[in-house]
Amino acid sequence: MGLGLKLPTIYNVHLVAIIATLGGALFGFDISSMSAIVVTDQYIDYFNNPSDVIQGAIGSALAAGSVVGSAVAGPLSDKIGRRDSIFLACFFWLIGTAIQVACQNYGQLIAGRVLNGFTVGITSSQVPVYLAEIAKAEKRGSLVIIQQLAIEFGILIMYFIGYGCASIEGTASFRTAWGMQFVPCFFLMLGLPFLPRSPRWLAKVGRDQEAIATLANIQADGNVDDPRVVAEWEEIVTVMNAEREAGKGWRKFVKNGMWKRTMAGMTVQAWQQLAGANVIVYYLTYIAQMAGLKGDVAMVTSGIQYAVFIIFTGVMWLFIDKTGRRTLLVYGALGMGFCHFVVGGVMGAHHTNVPEGVGGNANIVISVHKGAPANTVIFFSYMLIVVYALTLAPVCWIYAAEVWSLGTRATGMSMAAMSNWVFNFALGMFTPPAFVNITWKLFIIFGVLCITAAVWFWIFYPETCGKTLEEIEILFGDDGPKPWKTKKGESRLGAEIEAVKARKTVENEIEVHEHKNDEKV
């Protein structure tokens, strides 16, 4: 890490991914550091029952910081590398967490969450880039999805830490819970120095020999002459040379068809937020109370969704590279839209207004009728999370990491993540007031957005599953196929590997022939 120390390097890509995606665990910890806390008496009393805009500002402070972090992540990553930019971001997390633990008012709490968000803005954009650049094409999805699993494990662990701390009297309740955010950051900073640098970043900055050696260690146990290593390196060099002629600065994000990739990378992240799953992820405790669940039952019911999230994302980890990205995006958006319509429709038809707030919580102003209506709302809230975990949650991050060229990937992924966080921030500010002012109609709005997203995915997004990062260049080119005519797989890398093998066979035969001629002479 620039300290002159030579540390052993880990090249097992799954172990590399597990360490790197602790950056996702930071994100998860920060999300549910609020989820289990916002309904506790200790939090409500100390911060004077924050509601409406104030609670929206507290909740969206993470996203506000993440917008800034995402904005600087690309240039920073291109300058010092994917790995080192993640390491640097961790220091802001330590400071932000310390401020949250010591906060005396909601202003300081917001400030601490903004700093934590700055870290998440960098890690959420650069961890997928790093994983995409070290992975084999046919395994890329399963590596990047580990990032989503890390987020979900972070959410689950932190939620139940918060739930456990709810029994502690006074401010020690939430201060203890927030202090636990130091833990994943410590292990991330401990592990990062042992990870290799991205071979594609090394190539980009002219460190060719180190890039080839790293690529060989990751792909072929260190054999630089392995046909796969040779073929992939030749493809990297070819694309890199073409990109150097494609223009500099912001022109490279729109020139020669790049606008299509810029649009795809940024909109897929925006749609992940506009699909509305985070309303459930962040505020299922509110929905549970609307459905008449109270106390520990409401808290545990909300916590179970995070376990469901992990289980179904884990299922998709086994199949992510066997199923097309387009298929999952389109059908996932349709499934989520259906769930939103059911939740909103049942709430609208079977509720009682509670102006003073359910259980005194000023953010919850309707109560769903007990029995079948309440059970339906809870069930389809869970079903929405299941569909999201199987589709948009992992695939939006994977797709956003895949669509960029080598010359635009770090900054492009930063732009994509920034798009995610801008809409996350906007929805964070919008959702608490929406629960108060339009109540059940909020879910109808998200249902309409999900249907719109499905149409958008089908029209504009070509299939990237099974393609090398360099091959994706062709899909977005002016002469590329229509998105709805693309299919998963059909990678040309296999043919290039065979070509390398054939070339080496010919070279070996020539060497043998020349050696025999020398012996005759």
Image (cartoon, rainbow, N blue to C red):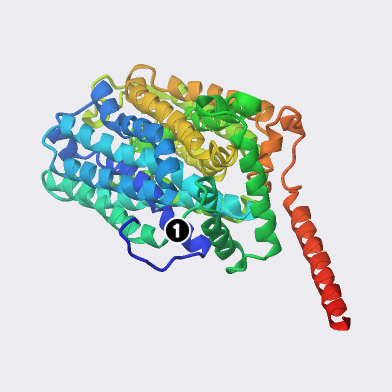
* Residue 420 pos. (x, y %): 45, 31
Identify the image quadrant of the C terminus: bottom right
Q: Residue at x 73, y 48 (%)?
A: 489
Q: Nearer the viewer, residue 160 or 355?
A: 160
According to the picture, the residue beneath numbered tag 1 turns out to be 18
- Left-right relation of 401 to 124: right
Identify which residue is drawn at 47% across, 35% down: 411
Residue situated in front as seen by the camera: 403 or 312: 403
* Residue nearest the observer in this picture, 236 or 174: 236
Count of marks overlaid on the render: 1
Q: Nearer the viewer, residue 76 or 316?
A: 76
Pick out the residue farthest to the top. 437
- Which structural element holds mark 1? helix
Q: Disc 1 residue type?
A: Ile
Image location (x, y in percent) of residue 81: 43, 47
In percent of width and height, residue 329 lies at: 61, 36
Residue 209 seen in render = yes
Q: Position of residue 230 (x, y in %)?
A: 67, 58
Is residue 300 something that shows in the picture? no
**In the image, is residue 280 above or below residue 148?**
above
Residue occupying the point 84% across, 78% down: 518
Q: Quadrant of the N terminus?
A: bottom left
Does residue 478 appear left or right of residue 259 in this picture?
right
Q: Residue furthest bottom?
A: 519
Residue 277 to residue 180: above or below: above
Instruction: Please tell me whether residue 1 is drawn above or below residue 217 in the rendered image.
Output: above
Decide: few, some or many residues near mark 1? Use Cα within 10 Å; few <14, some 14-19, many ≥20: some
Seen at 15% across and 40% down, the residue is 42
